[in-house]
Amino acid sequence: MGSTFLLSLIGGFISDTFISRFTTSIIFGFIEVLGLALVTIQAYSKDLQPAYCGKPSCIDGSKAVMFYFSLGLLALGAGGVKGALPALGGDQFDHKDPKEAKALARYFNWLLLSTTLGACVGVTGIVYLTTEKHKWYWGFFISTVATFIGFTVLALGKPFYRLREPKMADSPIVRITQVIVVAINNSKLALPDSPDELYEISKTENDFREEIISHTNQFRFLDKAAIVPKDSNTTPWTVCTVTQVEEVKILTRMLPILFSTVIMNTCLAQLQTFSVIQGNFMNRKIGNFNVPAASIPIIPLVFMSILVPIYEFFFVPFARKITKHPSGITQLQRVGVGLVLSAISMAIAGIVEVKRRDQAHRDIMKPISLFWLSFQYGIFGIADMFTLVGLLEFFYREAPIGMRSLSTSFTWLTLSFGYFLSTVFVNVINAITKRTSSSKQGWIHGLDLDSSHLNLFYWFLAILSCLNFLNYLYWASWYKYKMEEPDHSEPKAIDMTTEQLPVEEVPDPTEAKGEDLSTRPLVAEEEPEHTEAKAKDSSTRPLLVEEGSTVDGGVTEVHEGPSSVQTEDSKQQPTS
C-alpha cells in the first residue's frame, strides 16, 4: 500500500510533463491489469507457489522473482493511475465558473463514493469467496476482470473529455528549478519597491500558461527570480515570471499541510491491521453467518457510503448558504474536521480494546461482539470522508494548472508516509517499552493480543493526533490561498516585455460598425514622409472611431465619450 501511494508521484509527474492525463491513466492501467493477471496466475498454479517450510516466508528463487515482479507491476500501475486519474476528472470542470466550481466539489465527493462502493464489494464478496469458500485465485481473477472493464470504459469516453496536452517546457521540475536557480543568482540584488516592477508575461504571449497568479508577500526571497535583468536578456534561466515564482510559493506552502496529515494516515494503517487481528479474538457471528475478519473494514465503508450522499445533498447546500463557498466549507476546514475525528477514533479504539481484553481474561469462551469495533471504525470513516476529499480538492484547486497531477499525488503521498510510519512506530514503541517494562515485553508483541497492551498504543496515537492537530491549525491559518487575476481581460500587472500598460478593451454595442482602435497601436506608427501624430493617452479609456466620421482635408474627428476632441497635428497631417 505504501509503495502504491508513493509511486503515484511518477504518474503525476509524467502526466504533467510528457503525455496527457488520459494517456497516462490508460498506460498505467494496462500495467495494473498485467500485474493483477500475473498474481492471478501464481495464485492458481501450484507450481508457482512455494512449499511450506515453517518459516514466516518460504518463497525464494525464480518464484520469488516472479512474485515480487508482479507486486511491483501492480503497485506501479495502480500508483500511476492514482497520480493522473483524479486530475483528469477535475480537468472536466472550470473552477472559475460558479456552476462548474460547485460541480468540481461534487466530483471529488462522488469519486470517493465510487471508490468506497468498490471497496465494499472487495471486502465482502471477494473476501468471502477467497477465505470462506477457499477459492483464493478467484479473488484476483475477479479483480483483474473488473479492472480491465473499468479502463475499457475510461478509454471509450475519450471523445467526450477535455484533454490538456502538456509541454516539456511546462515540466514542474524544470519550472521549479528555474525559480530556485535564478533566485540564488539574484540573491545579492535588491527587490524593487513595488511588486508591479517584477517581470510578468502578457496575455498575448505564445507561452501563456492559461492563468496569471497574483503576487504574494510570503517567501520574498523567491521574488528575486522575477527581477528584470538590466541587459533585458529575458531567458527562462535569467528571469522568471511572477506567476512562475508564485507556483513555487504555492507548492512550498502546501508542504506543511501535507505533512500535517501523515499522522492521521498512520492511524488508518493501524486500524487496517490491528483491528483485523482484534476481530479474530471477537465473536464474529451474525446469526448462523460467520463474518470473515478481513471484512471488518466494511464498517467504515458503509458509514462513508451513507454519509457522502448526506454530506453532498444536505450539508453542502446548507453550509453554502452561510459561507457562500462552492464546497460549503473550505478544503482546509474540512481536513481539520477529519483530523479531530481521527483523534477521537483512536481514543475510542483504546477503550474498546480494554473492554475486549478484560472480557477475554474473564471468560475466553464468551468474547465480545465484533461490532464493538464499529464505534472506532465508524468515526474514522467520517474522518476519512472529510480529510481525503478535502485534500484531493485542496491540492487540485490550489495547484498551478501545469502541476495539478503532481499536486493531487500529494494526497496519496500522505497515505504512503502514513503506512510506512506505522511500521516505524510499531517497531520503535516495541523496542522502547521492551526495555522499560518489568516483563521485558513490548506493548505489542506476538499475535496474542490478550497479553499485549494495544490500548496503550492506540492512546499514544490519540495523544499524538491531538498534538498534530494543533500543529495543523498553525499551518492552516498561515496558509494563503492562491489568488488569480479576476478577469484575464483586465490585467493589473505591468507588461514588462513592452514596458507599457496593457489596453483595456471595452466594446460598445451601439457602435458595432465602428473600428475598434483598442486592437490597434495607440501610438501612431512612424512614416518616412510625415511627422509623428500625437496620440491621446488612452491607457485608461478606449478610443473608438465614431461611425460616420470622415477624413476630410486631413482632419480626423475622434470621439471620446460624449465630447469630440481634435488633435492639432491632425489638422495638418493625416494620421496613420
Image (tube, helix red, strand yellow):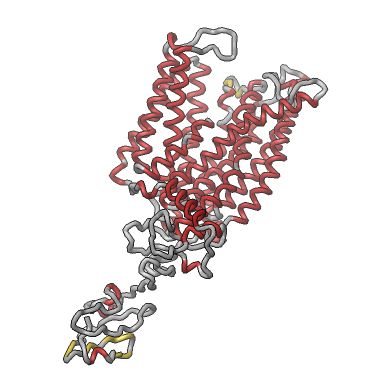
Residue at the location (54% across, 50% down)? 252
Give coordinates of residue 450: x percent, y percent: 73, 21
Quarter of the image that includes the C terminus: bottom left
Residue at the location (71% across, 37% down)? 347
Give coordinates of residue 345: x percent, y percent: 66, 38
The answer to whether residue 146 shows anywhere in this view is: no
The answer to whether residue 64 shows anywhere in this view is: yes
| Residue at far left of view | 553
Q: How many marks?
A: 0
Res 23 quadrant in image: top left
Seen in the image, is 308 located left or right of residue 90? right
Residue at the location (36% across, 80% down)? 541
Q: Reply above or below: 256 against 452.
A: below
Q: Reply above or below: 115 against 35.
A: below
Residue at the location (47% across, 21% down)? 68
Give coordinates of residue 66: x percent, y percent: 43, 17
Nearer to me, 312 or 18 = 18
Res 560 quadrant in image: bottom left
